[in-house]
Amino acid sequence: MSVPEQEITRDAVINLREVTADTVWKITRLKVKPEQEQFVADNAFSIAQAYFEPKAWFRAIYADEMPVGFVMLYDDPDKPEYYLWRYMIDARYQRMGFGLQAMRLLIDYVRTRPAATALLTSYVPGEGNPSPFYARLGFVETGEVDDDENVMRLALEYDER
């Protein structure tokens, strides 16, 4: 059984919502393109992991009323660097601008966190990895490698958008 497709347009309102008992099935059914599967964990696995990590903060990404993606943050208010742990947009909704909008919402959220100075993320090297996407948002390579993944960093100084 798959999530029924609705007509979603590029001007849909993007927001981050809690995953609930009523929505978890739809969120776990979201999938990236087959060639992207090596770069991101399955949403069901991520949600299960989050329930055993007190510092996990996770949300479904919605375009209007349709779930289109998932994001998970390691949210430790005792450290100034926050960590984007998981991020995905369903294959059907990629290249519509939703990912960029959702990341901006996440970055805005992190800016509200205590003493936040940076948002880190990492990616598996390889053809089709998401580093160009992160670079468009201002993330830069740190030169660090963590668990065979390249680390990128976004400084969170105030901007006047």
Image (tube, rainbow, N blue to C red):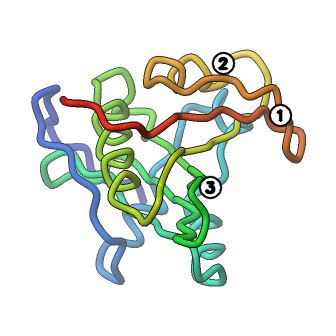
Q: Are discs 2 and 3 less than 8 Å apart at CB? A: no
Residue 24 x %, y %: 40, 72
Q: Amino acid at mark 3?
A: Asp
Task: Decide: few, some or many residues near mark 2? Use Cα within 10 Å; few <14, some 14-19, many ≥20.
Answer: few
Task: Decide: few, some or many residues near mark 3? Use Cα within 10 Å; few <14, some 14-19, many ≥20.
Answer: some
Q: Which residue is mark 1?
A: 144
Distance of label 1 from label 3 (alpha carbons): 25 Å
Residue 25 x %, y %: 41, 70
The tag earlier along the polypeptide, 2 or 3, is 3
**Label disc, if present, on residue 128 of the rendered structure:** 2
Report the residue at 50% width, 48% height from top: 117
Q: Amino acid at mark 2?
A: Gly
Report the residue at 40% width, 37% height from top: 157
Q: Which residue is mark 3?
A: 42
Report the residue at 29% width, 79% height from top: 22
**Label disc, if present, on residue 78 of the rendered structure:** none
The tag earlier along the polypeptide, 1 or 3, is 3
Which quarter of the picture shows residue 50? bottom right
Q: Amino acid at mark 1?
A: Glu
Q: Please state which of the two labelled residues, at mark 1 or mark 2, is closer to the viewer.
A: 1
Distance of label 2 from label 3 (alpha carbons): 17 Å
